[in-house]
Image (cartoon, helix red, strand yellow):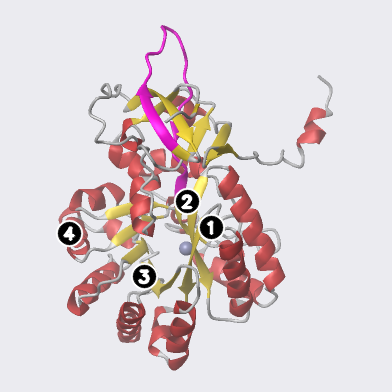
Amino acid sequence: MTGSALPPLLLPRALIDPLRTDLPAADAEGLLAVRLEHHAGLISGIQPYQARPGEQLPLALTPLVEPHAHLDKAFTWAEHPNRAGSMAGALAANQQEHLSRSQEQVGRRGERALQRAWRQGSRAIRSHVDSLGPGAEASWEALLGLQQQWRDRLTLQLVALVPVRHWATEAGERLARRLSGEAGSVLLGGVLGAPFPPTPEDRAGLLALLRLADGLGCGVDLHVDESAAGGGAGVALVARLVRQERTAIPVTCSHSCSMSLLPARRGQDLAELMAEAGLAVVALPTTNLWLLGHRDGNTPVARPMAPIRQLQRAGVTVAVGGDNVQDPWFPGGDFDPLELLRLTVPAAHLAPWQRQGLMPFTTAASRLLGLAWDGVLRQGAPADLVVLAAGSWSDLLARTPQRRVLRQGTWLPGLDPAPLLPLLEALPR
Ligand SMILES: [Zn+2]
């Protein structure tokens, strides 16, 4: 088959067909120079490339996966800031924002978020949606609309976010039944284990959630143990109930922070229990670094965050997400998957030149979301790439790289320039 050839690229070996044993070995950074061909939107050829001495090649990845976002509240920091940076302040500002939330507002926030994510190299997003309170209905209407409008460009999964005890109520059951009837991908979620360890009501809510979700065939994704206290009591409860109930649908524990403060042996036992229960974890370093560990105005020393490497060693699927973008829970972020990777390297000691360091953004995140494509390039895979103006991992970590994104063999438009750029360009040279 003939196809269009791309210029030679440096690709992580972890993102190229493992069955291609004819290819040369990767270099010490896990990278391999290749020439790719594509035809009708699909990869039609992968050939090794011998770089000339001194020739620099661009590093490329397959598009990344955002496993945990909040599109309904994105970009609300300016009107609803939380300058104290506390969990309580974030919740209060979030609830205040709900009072005036409209479908049109959420539609605009979601469209802006999806444009930025898509053009910056994301191919799928799982977003939680505030599902109790005055703005809940408007949020679902807007985001279900965007899910359909964007389905050919970007997979959008939506998770109902409520206090977990809500699922034990009649209203909770009605909500679950209604959402499970939607055409697109919808999951059930909830908040558990923060700010306080689970209560008997939380346990009853979690049990109701697991039974409802299993019966309706909806996946579950919880906000669990987003706290410095509690020692992983929330994830332990989820693991125990999932095993007791023999829950068959996939269950994800987003955050899973407080277990990181357990002594090593107890942390390992808990990670193994989670692996046995088949739980997956989404680590959210940005929001955790910002909101957790506040104490007497001091710079925090203990940084509660999902213990990614310990969980991986126990056999748990772990993905890394961006969580909050310019909302009361975190003032920064931009739906840029490369910025998230750049931050996670120092925050969690995840090295992208190791397979386990790259997986949480690519193949493991794809598996966690249940996507049809694992993000590995092989004959017949989507001709999807993020090509970087960076020639090495160090180059990528040195500065946010410019990039071009290829989707189904077509180059996407880049982001519009920053609104303030003309002011800078008008300054004297
Ligand atoms: Zn979240």
420 displayed left or right of 326 = right
Query: Tag 4: residue type?
Result: Glu
Region in magenta: 43-65
Query: Tag 3: residue type?
Result: Gly
Residue to which mark 3 is pinned: 219
Query: Tag 1: residue type?
Result: Asn
Q: Element under label 4?
A: helix
Mark 2 neighbour density, 10 Å: few (under 14) some (14–19) many (20 or more): many
Q: Element under label 2?
A: helix
Which tag is nearer the camera, tag 3 or tag 4? 3
Mark 4 neighbour density, 10 Å: few (under 14) some (14–19) many (20 or more): many
In space, the residues marked 1 and 4 are separated at their CA atoms by: 29 Å
12 displayed left or right of 279 = right
Q: Element under label 1?
A: loop
The reply to whether the C-beta atoms of the residues labelled 2 and 4 are less than 8 Å apart is no
Sequence order check, earlier mark of 1 and 3 = 3
The reply to whether the C-beta atoms of the residues labelled 2 and 1 are less than 8 Å apart is yes
**Mark 2 residue CB less than 8 A from any atom of ligand 1:** no
Residue at horizontal 61 percent and vertical 72 percent from the top: 139
In space, the residues marked 2 and 4 are separated at their CA atoms by: 25 Å
Residue to which mark 2 is pinned: 286
Mark 1 neighbour density, 10 Å: few (under 14) some (14–19) many (20 or more): many
Residue at horizontal 54 percent and vertical 45 percent from the top: 336
Q: Which disc is residue 324 wearing?
A: 1
Residue to which mark 4 is pinned: 272
* In the rendered image, the vertical position of residue 61 relative to residue 156, given as above or below: above
